[in-house]
């Protein structure tokens, strides 16, 4: 039952993120004009987001597989169980980092202050790059931990 609730929640979040992306895309059309020098930066930020967002599904699959290893192996060596739990925790942290970034991302309209809008987008670019790195590293460690299940 807990897995069903988790899957439902993840599906909701993914749907919400797609809707939010559409909102940003629409807002981007209103907020950024073709003459706007910040449009390219906004597009770059969203490109990084769009590159790693689909990996949320991979994170959830890895998490489920690792949790299943723990569940299916009641006699699992404590050290191995703790390792799997750490990897699961890292996967959760990476997933939460993406969700947090998406929820707080709210670019300023250039009509307010073009320089502040640029600074905000530069800051967001750094943050989304960190999220990307965190996600990719967590996935890599999750795959490694999952492949060791046969050992």
Image: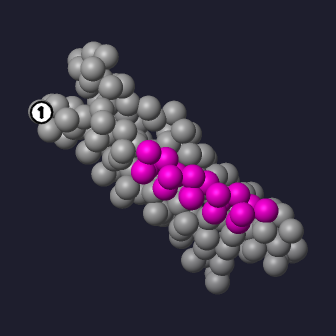
Magenta range is 5-23
- State the image coordinates of residue 9 (x, y, percent, origin top left): 70, 58
At 79% from the left and 62% from the top, the residue drawn is 5
Does the magenta segment cover residue 20?
yes
Residue 131, position as x, y percentages in the image: 45, 45
For this rendering, which residue is in front, 88 or 53? 53
Residue that protrudes farthest toward the bottom in the picture:
150
Q: Residue furthest left?
A: 35
In the rendered image, the vertical position of residue 14 relative to residue 33, given as above or below: below
Which residue has dot 1 on it?
35
> Quick one: label 1, few (<14), some, or many (20+) residues within 10 Å?
few
Vertical side of 33 occupied by 137: above or below: below
Left or right of residue 118, residue 130 in this image:
right
Asked where in the image residue 73 lies, by quadrant, the reply is: bottom right
Q: Quadrant of residue 1?
A: bottom right
Q: Is residue 57 left or right of residue 109?
A: right
Task: Return the x and y of residue 102 as percentages of the image width and height.
Answer: 50, 42
Give coordinates of residue 21: x percent, y percent. Answer: 43, 49
Left or right of 135? Residue 78 is right
């Amino acid at each position: 039952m807990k897995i069903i609730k988790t899957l439902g929640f993840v599906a909701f979040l993914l749907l919400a993120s797609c809707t939010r992306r559409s909102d940003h895309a629409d807002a981007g059309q209103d907020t950024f004009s073709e003459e706007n020098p910040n449009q390219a930066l906004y597009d770059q930020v969203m490109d990084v987001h769009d590159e790693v967002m689909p990996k949320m599904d991979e994170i959830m699959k890895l998490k489920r597989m690792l949790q299943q290893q723990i569940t299916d192996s009641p006699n699992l060596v404590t050290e191995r169980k703790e390792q799997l739990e750490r990897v699961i925790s890292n996967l959760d942290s990476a997933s939460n980092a993406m969700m947090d970034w998406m929820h707080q991302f709210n670019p300023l309209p250039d009509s307010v202050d073009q320089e502040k809008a640029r600074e905000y987008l530069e800051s967001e670019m750094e943050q989304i790059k960190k999220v990307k790195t965190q996600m990719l590293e967590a996935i890599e460690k999750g795959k490694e931990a999952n492949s060791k299940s046969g050992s």
